Structure formats: structure tokens, C-alpha cells
């Protein structure tokens, strides 16, 4: 008898759809492909020797704890360090306001578990980080996109959306935002927008989840103060991560938020994993506390800046002028807009793969539909030469595609 797996799954499993990006990895991450698809850190930047040495010391000297289970809310010293880091960045924060998670992805999942009921609308940016929309949807929430421009989400669209939802008897509780160097657009929300969004959040009683994994990777200028530091009412839940500033392999992130909320998050985490990796937390603490991670970030900034400049310079040089792209001042992502007479980005990706170059077409980042002529390009992973080579190949492809579509229109 063959097993009909569908008969066994719980109702909520129907809501879990794989990330379009992860599904594409099979095609895009083949070694011969120059991939601008995944938002992975450059693995050449992982400080392997320093990590190996520190881990060996930790196991030898603190192995009794580093190899043991730990408290669900996280290692005390790391939490205290992160509370201090939050305070240095302008956010009042005590030990009780920090818990450690398995990266910020787990934080998103746990927060949705305790805050989102089936049918709840959740405000997100349009376009938004796919992993957050996946978490929202897996608990039955419905992401409602708030249009963005390069200064961030538009407050008037947000207010209109809130009013329209209220007419349907729905009052969203949450707005999810990546305020700095957003995934997927690379946009940073301006200070004025942050203030306007906070004002709306106060008026409509919304919690804000501020996901900030890229905020320290600043290649130009400065980032505005975080929502968390501007918030006077305790409604901002801040997510931090070691994935982009250090390494994702330890899966360590944190939530900084109001103590009563975090108590519930801890209960949800208890049934998920009991605790985050003790070894990972001790490694993060050992290297943070010595100032090593901050020094590493400084090095990363110089290295990623070169990659960003290589990508933007090559796009300037090789992309036909009708193709628009964002000029991020930090982070990993460039957002590309193709003109309407081009084929959808999905088809362009197939043609690009034939030329052994990959990116992510944009549709999956849009909760309200659309985005067919957009794409996300990540410069974090490929080397400098490959970045230029890949963009050059795509420039040639887009040139041909553009001319063909124009000829077709003329004929
Ligand atoms: C905006 C955003 N949030 C969260 C994550 C997940 O990161 P972590 O490794 O901390 O789980 C990512 C990873 O790409 C991201 O881009």
C-alpha cells in the first residue's frame, strides 16, 4: 500500500510553501553558475583560524558549560553583552529585554507563533523579505504589503491600508520591517519615515518588528537611528543577528523587546529547541566581548564595499540604460527594475541560467501581486571578477532582449 502523505498532514501544513529562493538553489548554486541569487555572506570572509582557535579554547576550558544545554532565554553573559550593545545604540535595554534565538529567522517564527492568529493581516513592506512572509503565512497570517520607495514604506499607503482593513473589521497588530539596507531592495528607511511610521503605530496600536541584520554593514554615509531607539512606548521588537556580521553557521540571533512579550517567546522556544546552541553562544560572546566581532565588521565593510562598487560599476557600464537599479549604501542587495516591454524577470532568469548567471526574480517578494519586472541581485557571495563577468554577460543578454522586444513592437 502506498502512503498518501496528504492524508496525514495537519491543516496548517497546507499553508507552508517553500521559499521560491530556496527552491531555486538547486539551479542557481551549481558551481559553474555565477550566482547573484542567494543572500549568503561571502564565505571567503569567515575568520576560520580565529574561530578554530577560540572553539578549541572554549571546549577545553569551558566545555562543561559550552557543550551542555543552557537556559532557554540564552547565555547570561551574551545577553548582558547584547543589552549593553543595544544601549550603546540608543535603546534602553536590560537583561530581561534580551533573549537569544537560532538566528533572526527563529525569532520571526516564534513571534508569529505567539502573535499571529489564522486570518490576521500583518503589514509588511512591498516588496518584503520572503522568509518573514513565510513565517507569517505558516501561522495563517496574511501579509499586506505597504508600497515602498527608496526612502522606505509610504506612511500614507500604510494609513490607507489600515483604514481599509478596519472597514473589513480587521485591525492588524503588527508591522514587519527591515529598516536598513532592506532585503530585497537595499533601501534604507529615512528618519522622517521612521517617525511617521512610529506615529501611525502609536495611533493604530501596532507592534513593529524591526529586523536589522544588515544595519552594521554601512559602506557610505550613516544609518538613521533604529525604530527601537526612537520608540517611547515599548512597541518595537528588535531582531539582531550574527549571521551577516560574523557567521550564519552558529545560528545565533537575538530579540530585544518588552519583558512580558519575551516571557511568552521563551515559552514558545521551550517547545521548539529548549535552547540555542550553547557552543555557538559562547563563541559569539567570547569574540564579541573582546571587540573581535566589531573589528571583523570593520574589515567586512571594506570588503563588501568593493563588491558593491564592482556590481554597481558593472551595471552602469554593461546594463542598457532603460534598466533601473537601486544604489544601496550598505547590506547585500541591489534591486533591479526592467522596462515593461521586456519579458517577465522569471523568463529573463531562465535565459540568464543558460549563460550560467543567476539572480532572483522579484514576484515572490510581493504580497499584493505584481513585481513581474523586478529582480534581486546580491553582491555578497561572488568574487570581484565574477561579479563583473556575470553582469557583463547579463548586460549582453538584456541588450539583445531589449532590442528584440523593441523590433517586435515596431514590426
Ligand atoms: C531580512 C532578513 N531577516 C532574517 C534573515 C535570517 O537570518 P538569520 O540567519 O539571522 O536567521 C535574513 C537572511 O537572509 C534576512 O535577510
Image: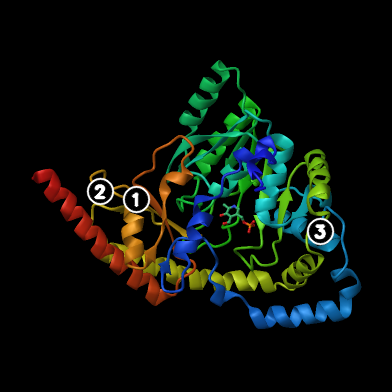
Does dot 1 land on a helix, a strand or a loop?
helix
List the residue tagged with mark 3.
80
- Identified at 81% across, 40% down, the residue is 264
Does dot 2 land on a helix, a strand or a loop?
loop
List the residue tagged with mark 1.
345
Quarter assignment of residue 112: top right
Q: CA distance from mark 2 to mark 1?
A: 8 Å
Quarter assignment of residue 395: bottom left
Seen in the image, is 382 located left or right of residue 374? right
Question: For the view shown, which residue lies furthest in the front direction?
Answer: 1
- Identified at 58% across, 61% down, the residue is 216
Q: CA distance from mark 3 to mark 1?
A: 46 Å
Mark 1 C-beta to ligand 1 under 8 Å: no
Q: Estimate how packed mark 1 is, as few (under 14), some (14 to 19) or many (20 or more) residues with alpha carbons within 10 Å.
A: many
Mark in front: 2 vs 3: 2
- Identified at 77% across, 72% down, the residue is 286
Q: Nearer the viewer, residue 12 or 258?
A: 12
Mark in front: 3 vs 1: 1
Which one is earlier in the sequence, the residue at label 3 or at label 1? Answer: 3
Q: At which x and y percent is residue 356?
A: 36, 68
Residue 330 visible to the viewer: no
Residue 71 visible to the viewer: yes
Q: CA distance from mark 2 to mark 3?
A: 52 Å
Figure quadrant of the C terminus: top left
List the residue tagged with mark 2.
342
Which one is earlier in the sequence, the residue at label 2 or at label 3? Answer: 3
User: Contact (CB < 8 A) between labels 2 and 1?
Assistant: yes
User: Image height check: is 233 above or below 267?
Assistant: above
Q: Estimate how packed mark 3 is, as few (under 14), some (14 to 19) or many (20 or more) residues with alpha carbons within 10 Å.
A: some
User: Image height check: is 37 above or below 152?
Assistant: below
Q: At which x and y percent is residue 383?
A: 44, 75
User: Image height check: is 2 above or below 116?
Assistant: below
Amino acid at each position: 500500500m502506498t502512503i498518501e502523505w496528504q492524508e496525514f498532514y495537519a491543516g496548517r501544513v497546507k499553508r507552508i510553501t517553500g521559499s521560491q529562493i530556496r527552491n531555486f538553489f538547486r539551479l542557481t548554486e551549481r558551481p559553474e553558475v555565477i550566482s547573484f541569487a542567494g543572500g549568503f555572506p561571502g564565505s571567503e570572509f569567515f575568520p576560520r583560524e580565529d574561530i578554530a582557535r577560540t572553539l578549541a579554547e572554549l571546549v577545553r576550558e569551558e566545555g562543561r558549560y559550552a557543550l551542555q544545554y543552557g537556559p532557554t532565554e540564552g547565555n547570561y553573559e551574551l545577553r548582558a553583552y547584547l543589552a549593553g550593545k543595544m544601549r550603546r545604540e540608543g535603546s534602553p535595554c536590560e537583561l530581561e529585554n534580551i533573549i537569544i534565538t537560532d538566528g533572526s529567522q527563529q525569532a520571526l517564527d516564534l513571534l508569529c507563533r505567539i502573535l499571529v492568529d489564522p486570518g490576521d493581516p500583518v503589514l509588511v513592506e512591498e516588496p518584503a523579505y520572503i522568509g518573514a512572509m513565510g513565517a507569517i503565512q505558516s501561522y495563517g497570517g496574511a501579509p499586506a504589503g505597504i508600497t515602498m520607495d527608496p526612502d522606505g514604506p509610504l506612511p500614507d499607503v500604510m494609513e490607507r491600508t489600515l483604514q481599509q482593513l478596519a472597514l473589513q473589521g480587521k485591525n492588524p497588530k503588527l508591522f514587519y520591517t527591515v529598516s536598513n539596507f532592506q532585503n530585497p531592495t537595499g533601501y534604507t528607511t529615512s528618519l522622517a519615515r521612521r517617525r511617521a511610521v512610529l506615529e501611525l503605530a502609536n495611533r493604530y496600536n501596532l507592534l513593529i518588528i524591526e529586523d536589522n541584520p544588515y544595519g552594521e554593514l554601512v559602506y557610505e554615509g550613516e544609518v538613521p537611528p533604529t525604530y527601537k531607539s526612537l520608540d517611547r512606548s515599548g512597541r518595537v521588537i528588535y531582531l539582531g543577528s550574527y549571521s551577516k556580521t560574523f557567521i550564519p553557521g552558529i545560528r545565533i540571533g537575538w530579540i530585544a523587546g518588552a519583558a512580558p512579550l519575551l516571557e511568552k517567546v521563551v515559552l514558545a522556544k521551550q517547545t521548539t529547541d529548549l535552547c540555542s546552541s550553547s557552543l555557538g553562544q559562547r563563541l559569539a560572546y567570547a569574540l564579541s566581548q573582546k571587540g573581535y566581532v566589531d573589528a571583523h565588521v570593520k574589515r567586512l565593510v571594506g570588503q563588501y564595499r568593493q563588491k558593491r562598487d564592482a556590481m554597481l560599476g558593472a551595471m552602469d557600464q554593461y546594463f542598457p540604460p532603460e534598466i533601473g537599479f537601486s544604489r544601496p549604501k550598505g547590506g547585500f542587495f541591489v534591486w533591479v527594475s526592467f522596462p515593461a516591454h521586456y519579458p517577465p524577470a522569471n523568463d529573463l532568469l531562465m535565459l540568464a541560467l543558460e549563460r550560467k548567471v543567476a539572480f532572483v526574480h522579484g514576484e515572490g517578494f510581493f504580497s499584493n501581486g505584481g513585481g513581474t519586472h523586478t529582480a534581486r541581485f546580491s553582491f555578497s557571495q561572488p568574487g570581484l571578477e565574477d561579479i563583473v563577468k556575470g553582469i557583463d554577460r547579463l548586460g549582453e543578454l538584456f541588450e539583445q532582449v531589449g532590442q528584440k522586444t523593441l523590433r517586435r513592437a515596431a514590426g
